[in-house]
Amino acid sequence: MRRWHLLALVVLLVATAVSLIGYKTRVLGYPLSPATEVESWVVEARLAFEPGSGPVKAEMAIPLAPVGHVLVDENFVSRGYGIQTESRDDNRLALWSIRRASGPQTLYYRATVARQEGVRKPQGVPALERAPEYGDLEGAAVEAILDEVRGKSADIATFSSLLVRLLASPAADGNVELLLPKPASPEARTRTAIQVLAGARIPARMVQGIRLGSGASNLQPEPWLEVNNGDRWIPINPADGSHGYPKDFLIWWHGDEPLFSVEHARQPRLQFSVTRSLEPALDMVTRQAELAHSPVMAYSLTTLPVHVQNVYRALLLIPIGILLIVFLRNVVGVRTFGTFMPVLISLAFRETDLASGVMLFSMIVVLGLAVRFYLEHLKLLLVPRLAVVVIVVIMLMLLVSLLGYRLNFDVGLSVALFPMVIMAMTIERISIVWEEHGPADAIKQAIGSLVVAIACYLAMYHPQVEHFVFVFPEVLLIVLAITLLLGRYTGYRLSELLRFRAFGEVARR
């Protein structure tokens, strides 16, 4: 196969992996670190009322793709009620219904939202409505205000801001006092601004939202003004005319209609409560991607059952250890027992911990090796001899556990989970090398296997590596590409440079 074919395959694998990882981090927001947490808020709307005679129907506005935030989760709590949702223009409604109800009734809507930075989708420009028909006195006041603001503004945004400031000014003139009701609440000023802007043929609407605080209760929606400049809706603070929404402002409803209505009920009242919390970013992104029906999410490991996820958390780390072994054997020149035996030993270390695993591994291998050499005098066949070694290893593990328990040595108890087959095969390989190449070579390979197993353990079970490989399994394509490149490596190993350094000294002379 030509070299360019291999390079093209490597580039394709790396480009695919980097593209998928970039999409998941930049678009879907997958965290790069396992410790990343996301600030979220649980907003609870509580609609309470006293039912009258007849079937009860309740409507309540609920968020629909609020700007600057993402709706992560939502729940409806209403015992015995039928519940459905429907979209109406730019809004969404929750509809509860029940044929008979008795006693005080309470309906709950709970939404979990998180802040999301992004570009708002373009919205259509509404058709310009006809100018409203004002009364003589009212029309003259509107014209006077529009003339005053028009002369000081440059565009629709500045025009609207100046108008809002004029309406919010404590020293308002006679024209403003004529239009504003008394007392002039923020909602009344917003309605008046919309009415005056209609006289200038500028589309405007009211937006009602909730302030996201921490532990806030009995919150009431705040009105906000939006004007359309022919390109987009511009939010304007009705208190001071500034542009944009605050970061803690959650848009709940577009329009000046009431947030709720209840048929055949008395004393309806709506209250909001907000609680702030920190959640793992991975959990938040998973729920967010599920709601967004992302095609990438359909093939995510997080959609599998938990016990299957745990299996893949271990399996996906094996290629990392294998890549390390390929590098240490082919480039560095470390000699080990078997090809991938150190990876299996590092998996065994996971059952205990690194220090305890190394100590128990060394202890059992030394004892088992002594028994193995004794078995050599019995002249057993291969399979029975391996079976005897496995049985002896299990008996040694049992002995270590009992001694550890009697001596209050906790490490000895963890040996019960140490894979016995791996231990038996390691003992058998050491004994074979000992007989064929001598004790020095066997000890050298045993130390090499242990060092590589420790390196594999440190590389595979680092929390950052575990998180990255599980969340971004595409990284295995990069591991595959590097392994392919190492497969064509034909240069000297680092150990050979030391081994043949005498030739270099002769050449230099």
Image (cartoon, rainbow, N blue to C red):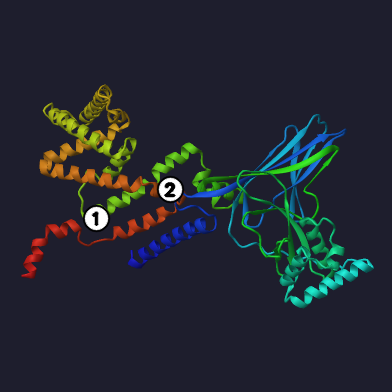
Q: Count residues near mark 2 (Cα–Cα under 10 Å), then give few for <14, some for 14-19, many for 20+.
A: some
Quarter that holds the C terminus? bottom left
* Residue at mark 2 to residue at mark 1: CA–CA distance: 28 Å
Q: Quadrant of the N terminus?
A: bottom left
Q: Which residue is mark 1?
A: 330
Q: Nearer the viewer, residue 410 or 13?
A: 410
User: 104 or 59: which is nearer to us?
Assistant: 104
Number of residues whose C-alpha sits closer than 10 Å to that of mark 1, classed few (under 14), some (14–19) or many (20 or more): some
Residue 115 position within the rendered picture, expressed as x and y whole percent measured from the top left: 59, 54
User: Residue 178 occupies which quadrant of the picture?
Assistant: bottom right
Above or below, comparing residue 316 to residue 67 in the picture: above
Query: Judging from the image, what secondary structure is the residue with disc 1 in?
Result: helix
Question: Image quarter for residue 474?
Answer: bottom left
Report the front residue among 84 and 156: 156
> x, y percentage for residue 458?
31, 46
Does residue 24 show up? Answer: yes
Instruction: Say whether disc 2 or disc 1 marks the residue closer to the N-terminus.
Output: 1
Q: How many marks?
A: 2
Give, as a three-letter code, the residue at label 1: Asn
Tell me the quarter of the picture where residue 312 sits: top left
Q: Which mark is residue 467?
A: 2
Q: In the rendering, at what x and y percent does residue 494 appear?
A: 19, 58
Q: Is residue 346 above or below residue 369?
A: below
Position of 407 with respect to 188 (left or right) is left
Q: Is residue 129 visible?
A: no
Residue name at image x 39 percent, y 49 percent: 465
Task: Tell whether 232 sits left or right of 444.
Answer: right
